[in-house]
Image (cartoon, rainbow, N blue to C red):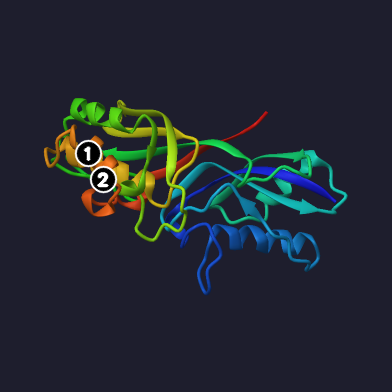
Amino acid sequence: MKRLKVTIMYDGFGFAGYQVQPNERTVQLELEKVLTKMHKGTKVKVVASGRTDAGVHATGQVIHFDTDLKFPINRWQRALNVQLPGDIVVVSVEEVSSDFHARYGTTGKVYRYKWGLGDVESPFKRHYVVYMPGVKPNVQLMREAAQAFLGTHDFTSFCSARTEVVDRVRHIKRLELIENDQGELHMVIEGDGFLYNMVRIIAGNLWEVGIGKREPSEMAHILTAMDRKRAGKTAPAQGLYLESVYYVE
């Protein structure tokens, strides 16, 4: 038996999220369906670095599974890709030690959130960028507000009320607002871990700062309040991408 670490990309538009759910199409379901077929009907459990919600995308999700197939490691990527649906792509496959764990072994993650700032919404990007036609946010104010999140904080105010995790302290290493030449504004955030809906709630609040609904100084006060009701709305799912997952080398 060997353990494989697999990095995948997926288009979240056609999924009800990553994790298996009754009567729903999910990323995990599609992965396990293919692996079960490859293992002649024996169910193979896939473990991911974390689950993503319906509509959320990934360019660097990491999973692991155990297999007893006598299959050369350099053939796994193609073998999986020819059987997976087109909205899931295997980027890389490597054999790892049996104590590697895609979820519990993470040391950090990077997420990217995308807004479209053009006057016209592109029909080709409507499921991948959040458009706010005619709205020009003050990006400098958003950058000022972003400073409040850097460092170690209790993020109770910035996670879903349905979050079951007791320890809500997380460390944010990087939070940048980047404008590109395609008329998009990206928020890139890197931390040691993230709570349920945390990135989307931070994005939603920074957007409110950008359009003048909140002052940059409010972010620090909302953090210390440790009350979800003090923070603004959760940003839409389609703008969010899980970009990278880090592990101890």
Q: Amino acid at mark 2?
A: Ala
Question: What x and y, as percent, mark residue 94?
Answer: 73, 38
Question: Around disc 2, counting alpha carbons within 10 Å, would you say few (fewer than 14), some (14 to 19), or many (20 or more)?
Answer: some
Question: What x and y, as percent, mark residue 86?
Answer: 56, 53
Is residue 247 visible to the viewer in this orientation of the structure? yes
Is residue 239 visible to the viewer in this orientation of the structure? no
Helix or strand or loop: what does disc 1 sit on?
helix
- Mark 1 to mark 2: distance in Å? 6 Å
Q: Quadrant of residue 92?
A: top right
Residue in front for this viewpoint, 58 or 216: 216
Helix or strand or loop: what does disc 2 sit on?
helix
Question: What x and y, as percent, mark residue 142?
Answer: 22, 31
Residue in front for this viewpoint, 200 or 185: 200
Residue in front for this viewpoint, 18 or 88: 18
| Residue at image coords 46%, 53% | 166
Residue of label 2: 225
Residue of label 1: 221
Q: Above or below — where is 132 with respect to 172? A: below
Question: Around disc 1, counting alpha carbons within 10 Å, would you say few (fewer than 14), some (14 to 19), or many (20 or more)?
Answer: some
Q: Amino acid at mark 1?
A: His
- From the image, which quarter does the C terminus lie in? top right
Q: Is residue 112 left or right of residue 181?
A: right
Residue 64 is marked as none
- Marks 1 and 2 close (CB-CB < 8 Å): yes
| Residue at image coords 20%, 25% | 140
Q: Is residue 20 left or right of residue 237?
A: right
Q: Is residue 153 left or right of residue 95?
A: left
| Residue at image coords 49%, 41% | 193
Spot the residue most to the right: 70
Question: What x and y, as percent, mark residue 109?
Answer: 50, 37
Q: Quadrant of residue 136?
A: top left
